[in-house]
Image: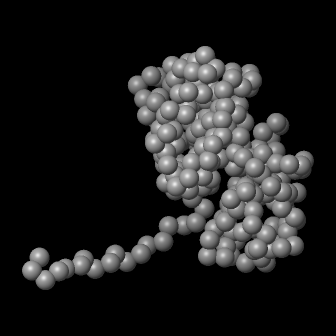
Amino acid sequence: MLNAALDFSCGELSFAAVYPCGNPVASFQVDLPGRDSSSLPVLVGEALKKAGFTYDDIDIWTVGTGPGSFTALRVAAAFVLGVAHGKGRTVRGIPSACGFEGETPFGDRVLVLYDGRKHELLGFGLKLDGCFWIPDGWQGVLETPDKLADLRGSYDTFTASPHDIEAVRLFDPSLPVVLSPHVNAAVLASIPPGVCDMPPTELIYLRPAVFVDPKPIRTFPGA
């Protein structure tokens, strides 16, 4: 049986199936512009078929829970829960940030940065636990470069994806930031059970929800 992971947190769909020992048997990473998730079942099915497996060979499903796109995270969670439904399979969530890949050694503490729009950044802290990165408990919104400067002494490395790195550099040009090209689904699938599991529906949104007054109902003459 296999362990499989799916992540759709940052505009790129990442999938991997691995043996319980961690050796990968199938994987791919592909951009899906506009959150076009209609091809998701076909892409995953074809990757498994090419490796000589089917959905029925997957014993444990892992889904990346963010931080990331509200819509894409929900699509990934719904897909995994759907394919595992009624089959007695284990389904768990792991923060997507735990599967980041970097270009250089990181040290023991990493802050993954995201473009928060509105001239802000979002941050998610990780610490090294054996061979894996796990949440260190810090996450939040960085409104000004001063807030980011306060964290420099706590982290060995700051990293961001290709989708976010330019926003990070504009936010604080003096910050040394390492490019993290992908979320590696094989890493997410290989994290041992119980290390940092969370419910697959408990998705990570770093910016608090904001209530917006509903717009008045439009009426038309004669309607």
Q: Against 72, is 221 above or below?
A: below
Q: Position of residue 47 (x, y in %)?
A: 60, 28
Q: Against 48, is 180 above or below?
A: below
Q: Quadrant of the C terminus?
A: bottom left
Q: Position of residue 73 (x, y in %)?
A: 53, 49
Left or right of residue 30: residue 162: right
Q: Which one is nearer the viewer's eye here, 12 or 138?
A: 12
Q: Which one is nearer the viewer's eye here, 130 or 167?
A: 167
Looking at the image, the residue that sits furthest to the left is 222
Image point 55% across, 32% down: which residue? 44
Q: Against 142, is 20 above or below?
A: above
Dividing the picture into quadrants, the one containing residue 187 is: top right
Dividing the picture into quadrants, the one containing residue 58 is: top right
Q: Which one is nearer the viewer's eye here, 138 or 23?
A: 23
Q: How is the image coloured?
A: one colour
Image point 9% across, 80% down: which residue? 222
Image point 61% across, 76% down: which residue? 118
Q: Position of residue 61 (x, y in %)?
A: 57, 31
Does residue 146 appear anywhere in the picture? yes
Q: Position of residue 67 (x, y in %)?
A: 62, 54
Q: Against 20, is 77 above or below?
A: below
